[in-house]
Amino acid sequence: MSDLALTRRAAKVADEAPLAKAAAIAAALAFLSLFFLAPLAVVIAQASAKGFSAYWQALAEPDARAAIALTLTIAAVVVPLNAGFGLAAAWAIAKFQFAGKNLAVTLIDLPFSVSPVVSGLVFVLLFGAQGWFGGFLAAHHVKIIFAVPGIALATLFVTFPFVARELIALMQQQGTAEEEAALTLGAGGLKTFLSVTLPNAKWALLTGVLLCNARAMGEFGAVSVVSGHIRGATNTIPLQVEILYNEYSIAAAFALASLLALLALVTLVVKLAVEARAAR
Amino acid sequence: MSRALVWRQSSPLPGFRLTLGLTLAYLAVVVLIPLAALILRAAKLGLPGIVHIALDSRVVAALRVTFGVSLAASAVDVVFGVLVAWVLTRYRFPGRRAFDAMVDLPFALPTAVAGIALATLYAPNGVFGAALERIGLRVAFTPWGILVALIFVGLPFVVRAVQPVLQDLDAELEEASATLGASRAKTLRRVILPQIAPAALTGMALAFARGVGEYGSVIFIAGNIAYVSEIAPLLIIVKLEEYDYDGATAIAAIMLAVSFVMLFVINAAQGWSRRRTGHV
């Protein structure tokens, strides 16, 4: 038997019967459809149930517009801060060998293993009326909890690891040879970073920023604890969705929710495109 | 000086002190100091104080529901997650890439959006809810609803842990097993399953940890009936709304302690997985 025939034969013995294969595919797709496709379909169906003008009205309503504006503001503050931190952390952790590196990585990932509600609670314990700095803040008329700064802090906390973790994983693989070459050729540290490291890591940076942004705009539990739910002032989009849903304004709730669902889909598509690019 | 005593290996790259300093300072301000506030507050309560609050029957019920349902959901996720990962890596069928991308949906879709979508689907007048009602099963506003939401948020952890291991499985082992006369089912059980078990368990632990802390996707579908379908994160919010900071702190401290234990277990499982398969 030729090698090719042998390989074919082997491929055949190491494979499932066609019927078992079809059953496995059917079961997996049924599960994904039930748990993943159906919720997406419901968001679209409910948001469009009352027609385009009702959809538009729900989004143009003053409280909804305030919620959209607040969500965009929070993301505009939080994402650049965490992206800057992610770059610094990835440079220190991926390009150098030092004691305590694993501990640093674990600490960076820490917010992922803390419940969103607990993430909000810690800021209430710090800055709330009965918190550590509550008296000091009240005496100086600074409001953090039940105000925008508290929402920004809680969002910073929960989205903290996204950019750093994407960058660290990639930059560790890439090593330091290219940077060392650039330095040998006379480039300065900043120039090396800007024209060697950053271009090499740009796609991981984009993925990290997108995931960080999606979470920053969609965070619910942590923000819910610190926001105080003041309409038109401290409600982000997810909090406004909750209020509308609990008031039985179902179509309006889903109209706002559809914005976040769209953001999620765009995030997933871009992530897929970046991964396909990286695989090539 | 021996190498173990060297704090940092020398490197020609600049900026180590600057970036590590920035990283640690930012980490301290955004994550560590807030978490320390919680730990200090819990320490002030003392272990007897925490235990006293934890033994309150409503707290016990909430913790039992939270941990019990999270465990059940992660068990469902490990079965279907392995199936989905297998089908997505081993078989070719139309729409495979779209379904593969969809697995990340719970990472990108805000929890509140998932929550209202699942609640609408499974409500007694919803598409799935009405059908299940006919066979006598009520999902919405019962612990079953919590199970559905936690299966949704946990699945990608298992799929994304198992997929890379499946991709790199050595085909020769399967072929050898088949050549030596094992049936396909036996090969799956005795050759493939042991190789993916560590990754599957890592994914299951991650899904469990996420489930314990989950808030947004659960509260809309759970009905939040005290003693029946009230989860621990919600009880923290209830306590905060009653200005019972101590109660909230005690529950949060218990959840944080469990997260740290889980983090340790996950790290150990990942180490095991890496030693066995060369994968995270």
Image: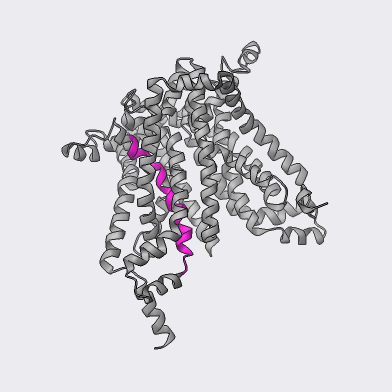
Residue at 49% x, 31% y: name it: B255
Is residue A37 rendered magenta in the image?
no
Q: Can you give x and y, in whole percent of width and height, for residue A248 in the image?
A: 31, 26
- Which of the pair B268/A272 is nearer the observer? B268
Q: In the orientation shown, which residue stands out farthest toward the top? A: A139
Establish if A254 lies above or below A89: above
Q: In the orientation shown, which residue stands out farthest toward the bottom? A: A1
Q: Is residue B263 visible?
A: yes
Residue at 59% x, 22% y: name it: B43
Residue at 42% x, 36% y: name it: B111
Establish if B53 lies above or below B88: above
Q: Can you give x and y, in whole percent of width and height, for residue A127 in the image?
A: 59, 20
- The part of the image, by quadrant, that contains residue B24 is top right
- Which of the pair B198/B145 is nearer the observer? B198
- Which of the pair A65/B129 is nearer the observer? B129
Q: Is residue B84 left or right of residue A237?
A: left
Establish if B34 lies above or below A188: above
- The part of the image, by quadrant, that contains residue A260 is top left
Residue bounds of the magenta highlight = B146-170
Q: In the orientation shown, which residue stands out farthest toward the left? A: B134
Q: Can you give x and y, in whole percent of width and height, for residue B233 in the image?
A: 44, 28
Q: How many marks?
A: 0
Q: Is residue A59 left or right of residue A128?
A: left
- Which of the pair A248/B272 is nearer the observer? B272
Q: Can you give x and y, in whole percent of width and height, for residue B254 in the image?
A: 49, 29
**How did the renderer colour the structure?**
one colour
Majority SS type along the magenta span: helix
Q: Is residue A47 visible?
A: no
